Amino acid sequence: MIRPVSNPPNPWQSHHVDWLGEPPPAKLEVFEEHAKTIVSENESPDVGFRWSVNPYRGCFHACAYCYARPYHQYLDMGAGTDFERKIVVKVNAPELLRAHLMKKSWKGDPIAFCGITDCYQPLEASYEVTKGCLKVCNEFNNPLGVITKGILIRRDVDLLAALARKNLVSVFFSIPITDPKISRLVEPNVASPQQRFETMKVLSDAGVPVGISMAPLVPGLNESDMPELLERAKEAGAQYAFFTLVRLAREVRPVFEERILEAFPDRAKKIFSGIRAMKDGKMNISEFGERMHGTGVRWEAVEQLFQAHCRRLGFNQPKPERPRAKFQRPGDQGELF
């Protein structure tokens, strides 16, 4: 059951703040949900994880290209402004995760935080549901991966470092654009690229394995940012890098097109034609499970450029195998012999 919160916690008044500049004017509605389940299984071959936890529904970051927008319609809300302003908090997420990991059928598989939201969006400053879930994973020695744009993650650096010492965690920062002005137009409520790189370094210095997710690649908008983004990520301690092509399935496309036309009226035609050039002449594919890679000469050139820079900078190199702490339920006896 989802209930609205009449006076939601204000993340801007917390001493843990995700936005370090001026907060954008926005009306935010928060709904508290006592969810029934928290661990979701993914069966799409295009997504690099099987299990995920999403402590929130919707995302205040308001990225124009967010592929998760259609999921908000399952709540009888819109994929546009509703997705960004009507946020659902799964307040019992840590308790649900604990119950799930206690099941005898659970074998300690890696869990992704998150699949369809950002687990470190501003409301995490007040609710701390992501932090609660990380504590559960640490208690059970369950491996996990985090992908985020939220610099609020630096608040949990000690917890993440504890997980890293047991070889249980890696963190990817989503940074697809170098210019803070362009970033603000496309990702209006996200901390600047510089602040994300600084946060990446904080985690790296604490011993947490970090990487950069240049996602999404938007042809005609951020292709040329690739070399600088990889250079800056390397300087910040990143060991890994990947990128994906923008996905405009279903209701994502009209939201994206409207905002691109408004933000870049002189470049919109170039951006739209660039996307079509990498998608067999289409802006989207009818199924939501649209592939995250492209086709054609232009795509091959971008992919080759990315791989060349990764080799030069030493990204994605095999690392010496480190023992990972064994998954164990609290109260279970260890092996006697």
Image (cartoon, grey):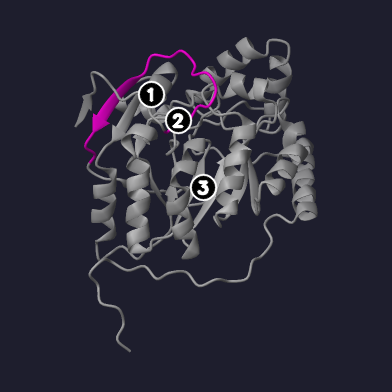
Give the structural element (helix, strand or loop) at label 2. Answer: loop
Residue type indicated by callout 2? Val
Residue at horizontal 39 percent and vertical 31 percent from the top: 71
Q: Earlier in the sequence, mark 3 or mark 1?
A: 1
Residue 20 falls within the magenta-colored stretch: yes
Residue 129 location in percent, x, y?
33, 41
Whether the residues at callouts 2 and 1 have beta carbons within 8 Å, the answer is no
Residue identifier under label 1: 13
Residue identifier under label 2: 17
Occupied quadrant, residue 108? bottom left
Residue type indicated by callout 3? Val
In front of the other: label 3 or label 2?
2
Tell me where the magenta segment starts and ends, as one range.
16-35
Residue 202 location in percent, x, y?
57, 46
Front position in the image: 18 or 4: 18
Give the structural element (helix, strand or loop) at label 3. Answer: loop
